[in-house]
């Protein structure tokens, strides 16, 4: 084989590994073909969810087939009192990524609003997502704020590894996940529900550009759903200030010394927890009082769970290696793992994990196995989570705004309003775009 041909093949392989390739001469599929494609992708979604539950070691719920008409019906459902299940202007953005094919469906109450399909490998998608993190320097923020691994062997929190320099043909992750066809159709959406796999679900959509001057967060609240089959759950409407009654508030636990971790204090987290406690007349658990035993004693009966603390995710062992760092005499007596959480039965309507990496874990084809999904599995329909290790100071400001907004607005909208306020004070997206809502926007 000639040298030119070898170089040409190498370039093709590099492009396929690093960026999306538009499908050649593709025409707009007819409605029946699109409905059939969606049904196939939804069926694969069911199989992926079943495998995810098996890896979690829990029994999967019954999941039937899902069609475009089903999703449309879910969004239009009404409660017994006649009130809407989903807010006006809600839409679902469903991503189906199998092998080298990424299909994107935007669905609202009227049906399928937009569809886009492109070719990109899983490695190419991860590479683009990693470049975005590098551009934001969120891992530099992690080095300064997160717990530092001092144990033997590799850190459980794997660093982002990319090649030196961008490969030719690399495309920004926002352009991959929000191509023009989808972006245009999003202009009149007010509440976006994203159903996607781990890499996509762990991306900060709030900071993605929508128009030349606007980001997604300027137009809409954003929720990451656990799956298509969570869309039909008729969660009771958010009760505003009443939801803050009987809240469990935890701030800056005094983490025990271990040979594996060096854990910096979080004075902003203590102030954040005390601020909420003062606003709702709750008795917070702070510092040495924030023991795992004390937290477990109050968790099952609390209407809201609010943790301003350190968190760790381990993609290699997400259930035992993903945990909240609480106080206690030993590691075993202090660290609350995702595996322990998912076996609980909670009555909380909202869990706030104002903690580092609480939205991360093992990236599975059906989502992320980690702390946030563990709380959802335990019965909490809404979990506020972070996608990277967050700044103590900017988080204090953002979560302070979120607390006030959630007393009047549903959590997804409250988080949007808090982000908009925080962006004015901290324009860098690394300081305000880390948080997202996992579960239901209602």
Image (cartoon, rainbow, N blue to C red):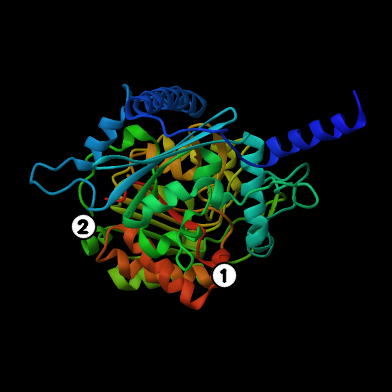
Image spot of residue 416 (x, y percent): 38, 63
**Most foreground residue, 271 or 208:** 208
Marks 1/2: CA–CA distance: 32 Å
Residue under the point 52% across and 58% down: 434
Is residue 107 found left or right of 358 in the rendered image?
A: left
Identity of the residue furthest to the left in this view = 81
**Does label 1 or label 2 sit earlier along the sequence?**
2
Which residue corresponds to the image point at 60% horizontal and 47% vertical from the top-left? 331
Most foreground residue, 120 or 263:
120
Tell me which residue sits at (53%, 73%) in the image: 427
- Quarter of the view holding residue 391: bottom right
Q: Position of residue 341 (x, y in %)?
A: 44, 40
Residue 55 vs 15, above or below: the answer is above
Between 339 and 124, which is closer to the camera in this rendering? 124
Residue 379 in which image quadrant? top left
Q: SS class of the residue under badge 1?
A: loop
Q: Which residue is mark 1?
A: 428
> Which element type, helix, strand or loop, lies under badge 2?
loop
Which residue is rendered at x = 49% and y = 60% of the image? 209
Q: Residues within 10 Å of mark 1 (few under 14, many from 20)?
A: few
Q: Position of residue 134 (x, y in %)?
A: 68, 57
Residue that label 2 marks: 239
Direction from residue 200 to residue 378 in the image, left or right: left
Is residue 271 at all visible to an observer of this figure? no
Residue 2 picture location, percent across and down: 91, 27
Where does the N terminus fall, quadrant-wise?
A: top right
Residue 25 visible in rendering: yes
């Amino acid at each position: 084989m000639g040298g030119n041909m070898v170089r040409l093949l190498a370039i093709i392989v590099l492009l396929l590994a690093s960026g999306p390739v538009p499908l050649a001469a593709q025409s707009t599929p007819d409605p029946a073909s699109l409905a059939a494609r969606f049904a196939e992708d939804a069926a694969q979604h069911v199989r992926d969810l079943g495998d995810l539950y098996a890896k979690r070691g829990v029994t999967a719920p019954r999941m039937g087939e899902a069609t475009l008409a089903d999703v449309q019906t879910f969004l239009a459902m009404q409660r017994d009192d006649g009130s809407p299940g989903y807010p006006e202007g809600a839409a679902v953005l469903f991503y189906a990524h199998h092998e080298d094919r990424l299909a994107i469906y935007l669905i609202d109450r009227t049906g399928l609003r937009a569809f886009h399909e492109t070719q990109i490998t899983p490695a190419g998608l991860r590479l683009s997502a990693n470049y975005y993190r590098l551009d934001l320097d969120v891992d530099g923020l992690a080095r300064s704020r997160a717990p530092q691994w001092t144990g033997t062997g590799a850190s459980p929190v794997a660093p982002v590894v990319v090649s030196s320099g961008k490969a030719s043909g690399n495309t920004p992750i926002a352009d991959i996940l929000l191509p023009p066809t989808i972006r245009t159709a999003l202009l009149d959406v007010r509440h976006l529900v994203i159903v996607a796999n781990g890499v996509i679900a762990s991306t900060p959509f709030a900071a993605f550009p929508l128009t030349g001057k606007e980001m997604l967060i300027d137009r809409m609240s954003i929720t990451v759903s656990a799956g298509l089959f969570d869309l039909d759950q008729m969660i009771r409407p958010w009760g505003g200030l009443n939801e803050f009654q009987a809240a469990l508030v935890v701030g800056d636990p005094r983490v025990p010394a271990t040979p594996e971790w060096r854990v910096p204090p979080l004075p902003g987290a203590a102030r954040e927890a005390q601020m909420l406690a003062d606003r709702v007349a709750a008795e917070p658990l702070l510092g040495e009082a924030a023991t795992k035993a004390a937290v477990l004693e109050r968790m099952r009966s609390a209407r809201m769970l609010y943790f301003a603390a350190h968190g760790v995710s381990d993609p290699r062992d997400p259930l035992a290696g993903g945990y909240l760092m609480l106080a206690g005499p030993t590691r075993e007596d202090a660290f609350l793992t995702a595996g322990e959480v998912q076996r609980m039965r909670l009555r909380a309507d909202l869990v706030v994990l104002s903690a580092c990496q609480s939205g991360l874990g093992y990236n599975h084809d059906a989502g992320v196995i980690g702390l946030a999904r563990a709380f959802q599995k335990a019965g909490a329909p809404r979990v506020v989570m972070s996608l990277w290790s967050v700044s103590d100071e900017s988080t204090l400001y953002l979560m302070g705004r979120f607390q006030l907004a959630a007393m009047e607005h549903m959590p997804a909208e409250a988080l949007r309003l808090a982000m908009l306020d925080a962006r004015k004070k901290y324009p860098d997206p690394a300081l305000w775009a880390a948080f997202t809502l996992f579960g239901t926007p209602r």
